[in-house]
Image (spheres, rainbow, N blue to C red):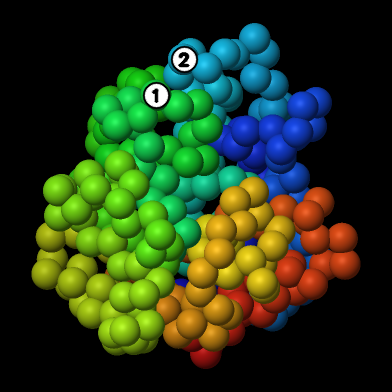
Amino acid sequence: MRNPVVLDAPSNLGLRPPAPGTVPGCYKLAGALREQGVLRRLGALEGGVVVPPRYDRGDWREGDGVFNAAALASYTRRLADRIEHHVRAGDFPVVLGGDCSIQLGASLALRRLGRYGLVAVDASPDFRHPGISDRIGAAGGEEVALATGRGQDDLTDLEGLKPYLRDEDVRFFGIRDAFRDDADCVELAALRIPVVTVGHLREWGARALARATAQSFESGVVSGFWVHLDADVLDPSVMPAVDSPDPDGLMPGELVELLRPLLASPLCVGFNVTVYDPDLDPDGTAGALLTDIVVDAFPLR
């Protein structure tokens, strides 16, 4: 196992305000997990922080495209610089978000290095784009579509590297069964991008599916893969502190069983955690659980 390096990416640029006049509190995720001792418990090196621009949607209105786009583009490049540095050095970056738009930083970094895959562990596939939806705006629900080249060029074609991910190199896990008939999941099925729902995981076994997925990247077509974790993949009975606490999610043990084989793969080059909002977790219970899951998911060193 390469040395884990904990890097904070406390950006909330990709989420809608939870209420008028407020900003999403997921930018506090990194601090909350650090308070739970994640750095010490992982035996990780200190990677510091990539400070995001100020959250300011200005006079954005529905139909204007992705809000905070210029700030997101700038931040994606700077976060990619840091992730690229650690991957080139042979480290294993553990990026603490932030919302899901931080995944664009990882995708851009790895695209600079070659061809890499993505395993997204998320309640929803974050594949919303203008081709299937007229509610474009929050990059935190659109980042996989953007990374695969769908959407506005100022986010999909940074450095002329569009797409950062190829469709055939993306895998989804933990999607809610209730979402299978949504437009994005229907399109993913047509594109033959694998979508493993909660029901599938329970039927076929999380560990077996994760091992098979890691092995699917061993053909030599890709140089490795990144794992993206959105805390909303967990059931709201244990993780209510997210912006979309949809029912019928994974339980902690199931998530650990899924993550362990993925993170243990020699082809896995990094990992990020997103969307947990400490503002919605006043006693810190959900944050403590998420930290336990992250620590338990890492292979013994």
Q: Nearer the viewer, residue 250 or 166?
A: 250
Instruction: Kindly give the residue lying farthest to the right in the view shown.
Output: 283
- Mark 1 secondary-structure assignment: loop
| Relative height, residue 76 to residue 241 (above, below) | above
Q: Quadrant of residue 164?
A: top left
Q: Amino acid at mark 2?
A: Gly
| Relative height, residue 201 to residue 229 (above, below) | below
Q: For the point 46% across and 15% down, which residue is it?
A: 63
Q: Nearer the viewer, residue 92 or 203?
A: 203
In the picture of the structure, the residue carrying the numbered disc 2 is: 63
Q: Estimate how packed mark 1 is, as few (under 14), some (14 to 19) or many (20 or more) residues with alpha carbons within 10 Å.
A: few
Residue 239: % across, % down: 66, 67
Residue 53: % across, % down: 67, 28
Mark pair 2, 1: CA separation: 7 Å
State whether residue 28 appears in this view.
Answer: yes
Quadrant of the drawing holding the N terminus: bottom left
Instruction: Kindly give the residue lying farthest to the top in the view shown.
Output: 59
Residue 218 shown left or right of residue 277 in the figure? left
In the picture of the structure, the residue carrying the numbered disc 1 is: 134
Q: For the point 75% across and 45% down, which residue is it?
A: 25
| Relative height, residue 150 to residue 100 (above, below) | above
Q: Estimate how packed mark 2 is, as few (under 14), some (14 to 19) or many (20 or more) residues with alpha carbons within 10 Å.
A: few
Residue 155: % across, % down: 40, 27
Residue 32: % across, % down: 78, 61
Are circles 2 and 1 on residues that touch, CB within 8 Å?
yes
Q: Quadrant of residue 212?
A: bottom left
Instruction: Kindly give the residue lying farthest to the bottom in the view shown.
Output: 300
Q: Nearer the viewer, residue 258 or 271?
A: 258
